């Protein structure tokens, strides 16, 4: 993988926190920053994929692909985010009608 060097400015509090993490994990500062950035990017991609799925802009498969996850992993993340499986109005009506049929006396 080709690497590029970037330069950023950070306030003293942020630098101090990064240095503390580096000490506690016995890593150099560059490695800590890289790992935190990679984790943040993965989280951003996941949040973006879940948002697109929630708005029905992308399918479950496409959202999983964008997040770099399997469909099962994305479904777990969707559940953890407290989102229900998206259903259109026709599907909701069909399921309600089926439920009402189950609730009739003498039916199991």
Image (cartoon, rainbow, N blue to C red):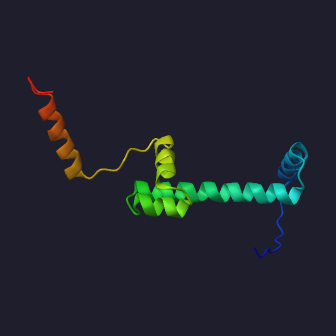
Name the spot of residue 61 as percent of width and height, x first.
43, 60
Image check: 86 left or right of 5? Answer: left
Name the spot of residue 65 as percent of width and height, x first.
51, 63
Image check: 1 left or right of 86? Answer: right
Check the image and report above or below for 75 versus 64. Answer: above
Which quarter of the picture shows residue 7? bottom right
Name the spot of residue 93 as percent of width and height, x first.
18, 45
Which quarter of the picture shows residue 52? bottom left
Check the image and report above or below for 72 versus 82. Answer: below
State which quarter of the image contains the N terminus.
Answer: bottom right
* Residue at x-position 47% and y-position 54%: 71
User: Outermost residue toward the top?
Assistant: 105
State which quarter of the image contains the C terminus.
Answer: top left
Front-most of residues 89 and 10:
89
* Residue at x-position 34% and y-position 50%: 86
Front-most of residues 12 and 24:
24
């Amino acid at each position: 993988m080709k690497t590029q060097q970037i330069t950023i400015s950070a306030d003293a509090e942020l630098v101090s926190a990064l240095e503390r993490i580096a000490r506690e994990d016995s890593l150099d500062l560059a490695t800590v920053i890289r790992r935190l950035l990679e984790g943040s990017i993965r989280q951003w991609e996941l949040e973006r994929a879940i948002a697109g799925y929630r708005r029905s802009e992308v399918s479950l498969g496409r959202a999983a692909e964008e997040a770099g996850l399997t469909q099962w992993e994305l479904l777990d993340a969707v559940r953890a985010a407290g989102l229900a499986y998206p259903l259109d109005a026709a599907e909701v009506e069909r399921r309600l009608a089926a439920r009402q049929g189950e609730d009739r006396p003498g039916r199991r």
